Image (cartoon, helix red, strand yellow):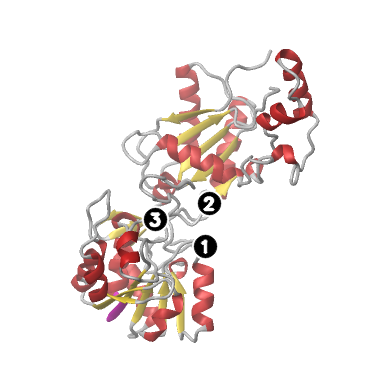
Amino acid sequence: MERKVGTVSRGIRCPIIREGDDLAKIVADSVLEAAEWEGFSLRDRDVVAMTESIVARSQGNYASVDAIAKDIKAKFGDNTVGVIFPILSRNRFAICLKGIAKGAKKIVLMLAYPSDEVGNELADWDKLDAAGINPYADVLSLERYREVFGVHPLKFTGVDYVQYYKDLIEECGAEVEIIFANQAKAILNYTDCVLACDIHTRARTKRLLKEGGAKIVYGLDEILTSSVDGSGYNSKFGLLGSNKATEESIKLFPNECKGLVLEVQKLLLEKTGKKIEVMVYGDGAFKDPQGKIWELADPCVSPAFTDGLVGTPNELKLKYLADNDFKDLSGEELKAAISKSIKEKGSDLVGNMAAQGTTPRQLTDLIGSLCDLTSGSGDKGTPVILVQGYFDNYTN
């Protein structure tokens, strides 16, 4: 008999995770306890997902601002450091900037405008147009920015990040100059030693800087890629994906956690006999149409996942079939025809008109976004998500 429910996403409550905890066992046990308590069964191809936060916490993957400062000093020496394209965030970047400032004598802070990489707005488009400013070419001084835009706090937090970052750098003992530009090479008129702080465009930014003659170029993904005086680190992403832990430390993105997802999968297989997929997820990958904020401040949605989550969906569009191929059918006859099409679909639907409008994205990005929305970022207390029925289709 066909199931009457498709995809279900459940938040799983867990104990508060601390450094050194056996996270694989805690996750597996929590999922099994939830299934028993709520009266549902686990099935093959269910997905268990853990937030990156509890993974990094169990690893003890923390670093102090002093560790950041020491790495910055080692890489840039006493040179003026151009810090370009950072996102505007007290949680994501301010604590990193504190470490950067402590390791530098002078910083030229270059902010993208009218918004940062993830959509935090620094300037009003209407004022920008009225002033005849071309954000793709024009470089603004702090004075010119204030003249046109005044104080422009972020809509949801009320923070004026221009002033906030300026004060933070000066409080750490560094001199600061602030400019606004969207061309990476603009910073080279101020310094040839640059720290690229963008997330998803970082490879291009670093290439452009090197082609433009920069002497020293690093990205945030190259700071704390190894331990400094026993600190945490991330060998692949450095400071990218980090979050504020305390006023003097950050929690880094999880480091080398493929073994963890495989261990959780193994434990669940031993206890249920089911082949369950497992992943670690951070930010989802979606944009808020009201606030214009793009959620993806992490370098990727999932830093580790089991092999069954590799790839993209291979789906037919039901409404296309109903409106085109089988427009003259209805009722059970229509249902049978669509079911037959699904069962006989090929393994690669690229270019097939019946697949147009389906989502050509990585499975881990899609499922990770669902998990991020389910767990939220506040006090729900569900850092583990169980997704069931995701790989079902109309014939199951």
Q: Earlier in the sequence, mark 3 or mark 1?
A: 3
Residue located beneath label 3 in the image: 119
Q: Is 344 drawn above or below residue 62 in the view shown?
A: above
Q: Position of residue 61 (x, y in %)?
A: 40, 55
Q: Nearer the viewer, mark 3 or mark 2?
A: 3
Occupied quadrant, residue 176? bottom left
Which residues are drawn in magenta?
A: 103-108
Occupied quadrant, residue 51? top left
Q: Nearer the viewer, residue 33 or 12?
A: 12
Is 105 magenta? The answer is yes
Callout 1: SS: loop
Q: Which mark is residue 64?
A: none
Q: Which mark is residue 303?
A: 2
Occupied quadrant, residue 320? top right
- Name the side, left or right, on which 166 lies relative to 319: left
Residue located beneath label 1 in the image: 236
Callout 3: SS: loop
Q: Position of residue 47 (x, y in %)?
A: 57, 34
Q: The residue under label 2 is which amino acid type? A: Pro
Mark 3 → mark 2, Cα distance in angstroms:
23 Å
Q: Which residue sits at x=48%, y=57%?
A: 299
Callout 2: SS: loop
Q: Is residue 294 visible?
A: yes
- Quadrant housing the C terminus: top right
Q: Position of residue 354 (x, y in %)?
A: 73, 37
Q: Nearer the viewer, residue 284 or 115?
A: 115
Mark 3 → mark 1, Cα distance in angstroms:
25 Å
Q: Earlier in the sequence, mark 1 or mark 2?
A: 1
